Amino acid sequence: METVLRGLSYEACLVYLDDIVIVGKEFNDHLINIRNVLTKLRYAGLKLSLSKCHFFRREVKYLGHIVSSALVQTDPDKTEAVKNWPRPKDVHELRSFLGLSTYYRRFVKGFSMIARPLHRLTEKQQKFTWTPECDEAFDHLKSVLTSAPILAYPEPDRMFILDTDASKEGIGAVLSREVDGKERVIAYFSKSLSKPERNYCVTRKELLAIVKAVEHFHHYLYGRRFLVRTDHASLTWLLNFKFPEGQIARWNQRLQEYDIKIEYRKGSSHGNADSLSRRPCPETCKHCTNAESKYGYEQPMVRLVNISSLPDPDPWSDAGMRESQLEDQDLRPILESLEKAEGRPSWQDMASYGPVTKKYWALWDSLKLHNGVLYRKWESDDGRSFRLQLVVPRSRVENVLEELHSSPSGGHFGVMKTTHKVRERFYWDKLKSDVDKWCRTCSTCTARKGQTPAPVVGCNVTTWELPSKE
């Protein structure tokens, strides 16, 4: 059917196997689309059953849903089957029930948490024992499915709102938008946590909820600005975190692809995502304290200090980094030109500057200013992901290499691995050669590898004399 109606799908009609819905913004448009679809079907030699055809409807049943011009809801005939479903007697019957229920999961808030006891019975090597907990989950699921809410359609010109939350057993999210001053739900999302994920602290669970929800609603959210609301105040720092590492860095990198704004909302107002906790991450969390325990750091303690003896402000702050970039003679012209926002300088304007400045000039389209600091935008080969690399002035190169190679967290890795670590966050001219030189002259690495043996060379062999007789 997709082949027969090629060119009309998603414009004049929607097609799934032999089910066709013909659409139109106005009555005349609808008539034209009907004529085009029927013409294509006639040319293909296909016949329609008149008893199954419905024309000029404002509301239709399609793929188990009631679809209208404004809303979508579950088909009462299908949910009635769920309501009258007898209690499963074996795994096969339970899987049939879960298959029908899962089809409507986007209508049910917290579906995975409700159905979790039932899903456990379908696991391999799990004995089928129907418990009161399963009975409660079975009845609850039938109840929420037969009273499923009406969902709104997404509208690209309205800002989407994504409410996320996490509990001990799972994560959930609600995607909504405002209609006439009221928030209308577009879809629900929920997911059970794996055993390792259940060991996460509250902060990581809440952050995981954001990442998974954004990925799930990617087709709605990608390419437009949207609001994420969470009841965990610690997550408001997420997009401004300067030097994330490990899992936090990977999650942060995923979210950098989206135009996202994170907003804190107190738990009493966060009921639609079922807030469970607003407490800070405990100090006993093994994930958050992993680095401290690994390197033997002691518990933090408080003591009085003389204010006059405090060090200067953090040199890696935006203000400190901007000052260092302006002091760099190669970066200063580029930074000042970007701030003027007058476009790329001409080659004649750059003729008097050194070769390093000219290299940065050649990268003009990928250079960005963020909080007054110069960054380089790096894109993957497939164009699906990008990251901002901090442009490091020459005076800070040693600090970066010391931290990412020679420090306890650096690990004294080889040239290629260290280069990859540096490029994930930083950029400067001759980066690869600087990393190569630093790794090869590192005293710790040299001591571990031992002395390099002398190369094997050939031995000089005396030429045999040819005997002769007179």
Image: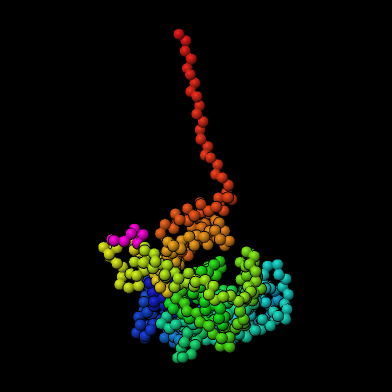
Q: Position of residue 310 (x, y in %)?
A: 53, 73
| In this rendering, position of residue 11 left or right of residue 218 | left
Q: Residue at x 48, y 81 (%)?
A: 227
Q: Quadrant of the N terminus?
A: bottom left
Q: How is the image coloured?
A: rainbow
Q: Residue at x 36, y 86 (%)?
A: 27
Q: Quadrant of the C terminus?
A: top left
Q: Quadrant of residue 248?
A: bottom right
Is residue 139 found inside the magenta-colored segment of the image? no
Q: Position of residue 243 (x, y in %)?
A: 51, 69
Q: Position of residue 6 (x, y in %)?
A: 39, 71
- Decide if residue 206 is in sight here: yes
Q: Position of residue 340 (x, y in %)?
A: 32, 73
| In this rendering, position of residue 86 left or right of residue 469 | right
Asked whether 249 or 395 is in front, the reply is 395
Asked whether 168 or 348 is in front, the reply is 348
Q: Which residues are magenta?
A: 351-357
- Decide if residue 420 is in sight here: no
From this view, report whether residue 297 is shown above or below residue 131: above
Q: Residue at x 36, y 85 (%)?
A: 26
| In this rendering, position of residue 11 left or right of residue 256 | left
